[in-house]
Amino acid sequence: MLDAQLFLAKTWPLWPSFEGATVGDEEQRRYPRAVPPKRLKVAWQSGTRRAVSYLESIGLGGLFIVTRQVVPLRSMVKILMDLQFGEVRARAVVRRISPARGMGIEFIAMTQEDRARLNKALQLMFATQ
């Protein structure tokens, strides 16, 4: 098992952050995360599964959705959020799963307009924390 972990750590640098990580753990991230307002929801779809869930954290690189309806790692997910400055849509991929809590999702595609709205909403969230 150790050889497999060593191999994955060398070939896939993000792999160690998936195993048992929680929001409070020290992790390497490109972008800081904000804690959204308590009632901020996200609509998401993966394959034929659709759901609306609460957000635990959000950043320019992705978000953590609170749900027990997790989908497999590396699944494609469509995201829709209604933020203070308008709707934000994105395509994303599941990067981390915590079956009891939810899943970490990385944004992989978003229009420039959606990115600008997300950035503006995040600046407001950071200012109020």
Image: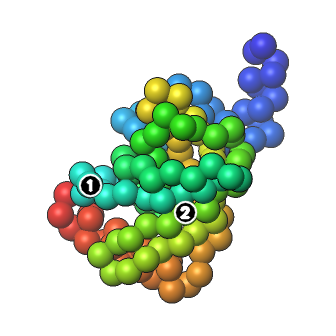
Query: Residue 39: which numbered mark, if any?
Result: 1
Residue 5 sits above or below residue 65 on the image: above
Q: Residue lying at the far left in this picture: please name it.
A: 128
Residue 41 sits above or below residue 99 on the image: below
Q: Residue at x 48, y 59 (%)?
A: 43
Amino acid type, label 2: Ile
Distance between mark 2 and mark 1 Cα atoms: 17 Å
Q: Residue at x 45, y 53 (%)?
A: 52
Q: Residue at x 27, y 64 (%)?
A: 126
Q: Residue lying at the far bottom in this picture: please name it.
A: 113
Residue 7 sits above or below residue 125 on the image: above
Label 1: which secondary element: loop
Counting from the top left corner in percent of width and height, residue 26 is at: 43, 37
Q: Residues within 10 Å of mark 2 (few under 14, many from 20)?
A: many
Q: Earlier in the sequence, mark 2 or mark 1?
A: 1
Could you tell me if residue 29 is visible in this image? Answer: no
Query: Residue 79: which numbered mark, if any?
Result: 2
Q: Residue at x 50, y 67 (%)?
A: 80
Counting from the top left corner in percent of width and height, residue 103 is at: 53, 41
Amino acid type, label 1: Arg
Q: Quadrant of residue 45?
A: bottom right
Residue 109 sits above or below residue 14 on the image: below
- Horizontal side, residue 9 vs residue 7: left or right: left
